């Protein structure tokens, strides 16, 4: 995306300007961006995550396998389910547990709740203001109160699902290896039905409102990595695939991808073994698994002009709403068919030689991969967690390089705004990767 | 606008779950936004920080040299400072580094420990500055959070309980999981306020609201480790979660290490 034949307005190259954004607002966590421009060409770009590391993986060592879901939930308050279920899948892999369909459906339901809550928070409250030239969602509330009210009600529904199935919206307490502590009551689950029926229309309303935004002209040829499941749009189970034909078992992730510790960031950087950046998250899922969306979600995606393969990262806000629409339909179907399972969980047999397990799920911002090795008593010897933000980090840098290069004619304030908007295409859950954005552009 | 009280929300080392609890007040959010001027809220607004503030809500623990300087500046600019959540009031899960070999912990996670600039400890906000009120929870309870903000605005003491989770179980008519099922539970030493979440899910309380006043952890620790046959190591682990740095929990876990 970096082009060297960029024609710049007179005088730009000669200018020495420094743009400083002390904090990148509306990003979950803290980060910084340094750009060096020489003769109108970006020669160096660094997106840094400077939030303090919390060392969760090291602190998990020596603890029982059963502690992993509750502990890893605390890596990120926006997507605790991603961590809980990632850890649970890995432990179930180690112990050869295959939970019954009813438990898997309940897990899908609570994950739908997390997607609704996170996608709506991200799109309507954190990202939409960028497109409207407004500083924050509270200002949209003044301009378009109905839109904000609809978004808040939808987000609340996501939280309600988390509460009904998981006991709490942030850091649910009801999930464990093998299933749930307690079976959600049928009456409580059925009570979600009416609001979910409303939610399908509400998601379309938000999707259509966002479709009217002005989308910056920018395209990337992304290497999209996501999960895939033979029977459903993958969320909580499946294997790993790429838009270039890779199709691997969850445990084989490290054979194809790795994390690099770069000096300028406390978040590790995910790359393919060939050293390439790759994309995880809504656009990657949509591009890889489009066929498995519901007919209505596909119809609405087409109606708002989303192409079959999305290459414009700013359209992630639309993809998030298409996914929100889809998970509202999914959640409604699960709620309608719900019967209380005979047992809330299947027993865990801690057997010698269980050894190790790998698990992955689709966090709202992309795949969250876990691996644990265990001793014979079920205690954790080693833990590796690869969060979505770490994986997207090099891709974010790449997008920023293209965006800054293509917009060097913008004044400092406008360029700063555009960079923030670009990062919020991802909304790096920076605290999950470790983690305050300072933007410094040295136009040498 | 000019005479509305100014509210700021600050983040230190945390998962953002506590500030999200504020954004999760969907029904009350617009009313809150109307009653105060949200002067700074990284998670929701784009305004650069500019003091002074009437109320500062602080999430997260102090884990870097830069943050120990930043918190002093926030104190200087704020009339009232309220620390929110287990990270801000006790150091969080990340406080477990305080008892380990820090260098070894860094090496386990990072290929280049020399790139990392952090403190060897994770400590609560009150370890650096005077805090006017500490709100417990991992995450905080959003109703309690609204109560604390409302009380601060009104200049009164917040109505937040300091009794144990057991009292809350009794009030909600929840059958005791220790008595009825022999499930180990931290409820007797944990401050109430979560809404009996764990016990309503048929599991023992995992202590996310931290120690209640004058918690008899010694008695409970003995009961869990010996009478319930949980053993000392697993009992120590029970006290070593999100409030591991809170003094009564820290001490009780150490006691079990000695075995
Ligand atoms: S106390 Fe818990 S919920 Fe709050 S920021 Fe810390 S880890 Fe997150
Ligand atoms: S379940 Fe736990 S918190 Fe509730 S009464 Fe029994 S010991 Fe106390």
Image: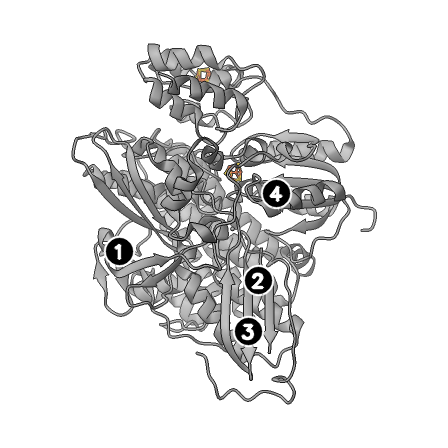
**CA distance for labels 2 and 3:** 29 Å
- Residue A331 in the image: x percent, y percent? 38, 47
Q: Which residue is mark 3?
A: A36
- Residue A396 in the image: x percent, y percent? 46, 65
> Which badge, 2 or 1, comes first in the chain's sequence?
2
Marks 4 and 1 on same chain: no
Q: Which mark is residue A253?
A: 1
Subunit that carries the residue with mark 4: B
- For the residues carrying marks 2 and 4, which lies nearer the camera in this image? 2
Q: Could you tell whether B144 is left or right of A424 in the image?
A: right
Subunit that carries the residue with mark 3: A
Q: Could you tell whether A210 is left or right of B96 in the image?
A: right
Q: Could you tell whether B159 is left or right of A194 in the image?
A: right
User: Is residue A337 visible to the viewer in this orientation of the structure?
Assistant: no
Q: Quadrant of the N terminus of chain A?
A: bottom left
Q: Which residue is mark 4?
A: B27
> Answer yes or no: do the residues labelled 4 and 1 have beta carbons within 8 Å?
no
């Amino acid at each position: 995306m970096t082009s060297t034949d960029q024609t710049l307005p007179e005088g730009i190259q000669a200018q020495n300007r420094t743009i400083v954004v002390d904090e990148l607002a509306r990003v979950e966590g803290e980060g910084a961006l340094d750009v060096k421009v020489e003769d109108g060409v970006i020669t160096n770009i660094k997106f840094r995550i400077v939030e303090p590391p919390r060392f969760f993986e090291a602190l998990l060592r020596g603890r029982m396998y059963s502690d992993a879901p509750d502990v890893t939930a605390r890596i990120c308050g926006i997507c605790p389910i991603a961590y809980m279920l990632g850890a649970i899948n890995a432990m179930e892999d180690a112990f050869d547990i295959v939970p019954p369909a009813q438990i898997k459906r309940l897990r899908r339901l609570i994950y739908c709740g997390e997607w609704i809550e996170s996608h709506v928070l991200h799109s309507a409250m954190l990202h939409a203001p960028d497109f409207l030239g407004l500083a924050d969602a509270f200002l949209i509330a003044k301009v378009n109160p109905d839109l904000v009210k609809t978004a808040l009600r939808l987000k609340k529904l996501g939280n309600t699902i988390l509460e009904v199935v998981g006991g709490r919206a942030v850091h649910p307490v009801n999930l464990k290896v093998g299933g749930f502590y307690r079976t959600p009551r049928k009456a409580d689950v059925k009570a979600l039905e009416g609001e979910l029926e409303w939610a399908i229309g509400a998601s379309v309303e938000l999707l259509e409102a966002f479709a009217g935004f002005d989308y910056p002209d920018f395209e990337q040829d992304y290497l999209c990595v996501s999960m895939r499941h033979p029977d459903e749009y993958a969320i909580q189970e499946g294997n790993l695939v790429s838009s270039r034909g890779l199709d691997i078992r969850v445990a084989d992730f490290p054979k194809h991808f790795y994390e690099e510790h770069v000096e300028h960031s406390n978040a590790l950087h995910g790359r393919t073994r060939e050293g390439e950046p790759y994309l995880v998250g809504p656009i990657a899922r949509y591009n890889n698994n489009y066929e498995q969306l519901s007919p209505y979600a596909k119809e609405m995606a087409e109606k708002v002009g989303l192409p079959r393969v999305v290459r414009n990262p700013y359209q992630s806000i639309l993809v998030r709403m298409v996914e929100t629409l889809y998970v509202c339909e999914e959640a409604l179907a699960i709620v309608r068919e719900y019967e209380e399972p005979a047992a809330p969980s299947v027993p865990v047999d801690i057997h010698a030689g269980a050894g190790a397990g790998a698990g992955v799920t689709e966090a709202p911002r992309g795949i969250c991969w876990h691996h644990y090795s265990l001793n014979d008593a079920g205690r954790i010897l080693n833990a590796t967690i690869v969060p979505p933000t770490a994986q997207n980090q090099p891709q974010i840098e790449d997008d920023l390089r293209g965006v800054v290069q293509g917009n060097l004619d913008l004044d400092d304030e406008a360029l700063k705004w555009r960079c923030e908007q670009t990062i919020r295409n991802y909304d790096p859950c920076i605290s999950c990767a470790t983690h305050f954005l300072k933007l410094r552009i040295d136009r040498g | 606008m000019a005479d509305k009280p100014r509210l700021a929300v600050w983040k230190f080392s945390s998962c953002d779950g506590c500030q999200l609890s504020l954004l999760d007040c969907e029904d009350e959010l617009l009313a809150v936004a109307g009653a105060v001027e949200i002067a700074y809220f990284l998670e929701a607004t784009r305004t650069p920080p500019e003091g002074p503030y009437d109320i500062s809500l602080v999430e997260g623990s102090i884990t870097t040299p830069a943050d120990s300087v930043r918190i002093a500046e926030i104190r200087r600019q704020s009339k009232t400072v309220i620390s929110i959540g287990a990270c801000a009031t006790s150091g969080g899960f990340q406080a477990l580094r305080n008892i380990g070999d820090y260098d070894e912990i860094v090496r386990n996670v990072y290929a280049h420990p020399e790139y990392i600039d952090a403190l060897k400890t994770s400590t609560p906000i009150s370890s650096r500055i005077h805090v006017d009120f500490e709100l417990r929870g991992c995450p905080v309870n959003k109703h309690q959070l609204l109560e604390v903000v409302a009380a601060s605005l009104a200049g009164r003491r917040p109505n937040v309980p300091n009794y144990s989770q057991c009292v809350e179980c009794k009030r909600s008519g929840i059958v005791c999981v220790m008595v009825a099922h022999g499930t180990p539970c931290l409820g007797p030493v944990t401050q109430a306020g979560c809404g009996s979440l764990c016990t309503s899910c048929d599991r023992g309380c995992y202590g996310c609201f931290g120690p209640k006043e004058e918690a008899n952890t010694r008695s409970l620790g003995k009961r869990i480790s010996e009478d319930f046959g949980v053993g000392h190591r697993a009992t120590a682990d029970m006290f070593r979660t999100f409030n591991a740095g809170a003094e009564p929990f820290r001490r009780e876990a150490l006691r079990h290490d000695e075995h």
